[in-house]
Image (cartoon, rainbow, N blue to C red):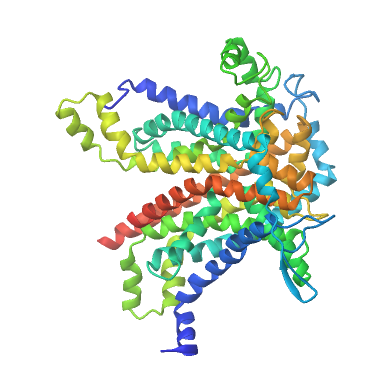
Amino acid sequence: MSGVAGIFKGLFTGRVAVIAVPFLFLLLFFLFPFFIVGKISVSEMETVTFKDVLSIQEGVIQLTLKFSNYVFITQDALYFKTYLASLQYAGASTALCLFIGYPFAYFMARAKATWQPALLMLVMLPFWTSFLLRVYAWRGLLAEHGWVADALVGLGLDHVLYALGLISTPGKLLHTPFSLVLGMTYTYLPFMILPLYANLAKMDLRLLEAAADLGATPWLAFWKITVPLSKAGIIAGSMLVFIPCVGEFVIPELLGGPETLMIGRVLWDEFFSNNDWPMASAVAVVMVLLVIVPLAIFNKYQAEAQERR
Amino acid sequence: MTAGSNPWFGRGWLAAGFVFLYLPIVALVVYSFNDSPLPNVWRGFTLRWYTQLASDQELLAALWLSLKIAFFTACGSVVLGTLAAFALVKYKRFTGRTLFSGMVNAPLVMPEVVVGLSLLLMLVSMQRALGFPERGMGTILLGHVLLGMAYAAVVVQSRLQDLNPQLEEAAMDLGARPYQVFWLVTLPMISQSLLSAWLLTFTISLDDVVLSAFLSGPGSTTMPLVIFSRARLGLNPSVNAVATITVAVVAVGVFAASYYIAHKERRRAREMAAARH
């Protein structure tokens, strides 16, 4: 079985086609575009469009690489602040999701077995309704006289947020770091809950009984057994929240304010408002570099989880 | 029994979590019936935002385009996602498998601005070199399939891993050809996950702002783009009305689908039980 005959045989059994079709699609439309972005990020911008990196002038091939975008990004204080702020907001949202989501997933996994499918359904249902509209709804809830704004102000919690530096004026909640982090926490909470639930529901409860028999208090058993065993779920959930949050655009645009700079918004403005494609590309390359380590962790976890089952 | 032995603490936490998750949806629905152009100030019941929608040409055209794109996205994503899931589950060894599985999973978390920008710049370069494609419905569709395929692959993959390989082996032993095994044995067994993947990718496409903004051309404005541009300007009751209709459609759709899936599941369990006797 060799050559053309082999390929035909392979196609017939489907193996080659099953792998090649999605593989080529992803290579062409997912991986290859990143190289184009890399190339354009070092291209020169001409009046309306970018210049090709390689050009032929008088029979000589010229390679023009312009690294000034990167120099600018690394030296400009505003850019640095933006990158840092994006990581901070994403980190804060991830921590909040974990704080709300871990007990939530835990109690879900320990609820009566007959209840669990319904609870799972209830967690997933908001995911089916438009994300854009749910984020938009927070504008109404947090605006002056919105339900949540009235409740928080009524309880005096706006002063706590003010003391924490999350809002700049007591009583004004929208378009602040607070509303931005709240919006991202809200949007990505199900992405934290679902992997944690999947992990915690599989746990062997006899381990806890053994710990109790050996004299551990429930609290000690929780920290020594349940939490370490759910490490994979914690990592998966945190990555699923953190990575998209770093590059988030819609939530900062609708719920953030002028002082909440985020990198996704900067990229958007460079591209759509300033029409500076090389600069937008350079911002994208730096963003990929920022998320590449969490991305690798996530991929490793995904691959492991898929092999182990 | 476990940490936090007071069951009410657990129930309270779950209840508070669900309030958090559902509060915005409830608020959207309530204020869509508010007879005041000022949101947050209740002034009585009205249906006028709904009647206004019926004559909102911009929104209706965008909705129609979005529905078309979502339909084709869902179909394309399920086909490609199923192939990818098959490749990853059935073939444990092939050249570039690590790269492949990375590329299948990466769009799930990769910031959408990066995916949108890179795909657009590639298409622009392609258009310079080859003269096509024009930006429009086709390019939006391409971006959505790229994203949807990743979600479809995850859904189908988890179902494929739960399948009993003996059923396929038995079919082969009885003389079925590989494509017959696929069409007659494997496909019926994964049909529910294909349905869930289809519905999921349909909603993802119908909801997408960022990829659509990068990949749309003149005259191809999708519904989320219209809603987004209105929402950016401030609160707008017409957006609430659209939201309420979406919530109603999704609720009906999801309940019907889950009823159907539960029904099939029960029937399969019965058949399995019957087969064992």
User: Dividing the picture into quarters, in which one does residue A194 lie?
Assistant: top left
Q: In the image, is B219 to the left or to the right of B183? A: right
Q: In the image, is B116 to the left or to the right of B271? A: right
- Residue found at the far left of this picture: A214
Image coordinates for residue B182, horizontal then vertical, percent: 44, 71
Placement of A127 over or under B70, stated as above or below: above
Between B7 and B220, the one nearer to me in the picture: B220
State the residue at coordinates (74%, 62%).
Answer: B124
Image coordinates for residue B120, horizontal then vertical, percent: 70, 57
State the residue at coordinates (48%, 60%).
Answer: B191
Placement of A128 over or under A158, stated as above or below: below
Q: Please say whether residue B157 is visible from this viewpoint.
A: yes
Rendered-image quadrant of the C terminus of chain A: bottom left
User: Dividing the picture into quarters, in which one does residue B76 lie?
Assistant: bottom right
State the residue at coordinates (44%, 62%).
Answer: B98
Between B66 and B90, the one nearer to me in the picture: B90
User: Dividing the picture into quarters, in which one does residue A66 lie?
Assistant: bottom right
Between B222 and B168, the one nearer to me in the picture: B222
Q: In the image, is B63 to the left or to the right of A23? A: right
Total numbered circles: 0
Placement of B37 over or under A251, stated as above or below: above
Rendered-image quadrant of the N terminus of chain A: bottom left
Image coordinates for residue B222, horizontal then vertical, percent: 75, 50
Image coordinates for residue B53, horizontal then vertical, percent: 80, 39
Q: Please say whether residue A124 is visible from this viewpoint.
A: no
State the residue at coordinates (66%, 60%).
Answer: A39
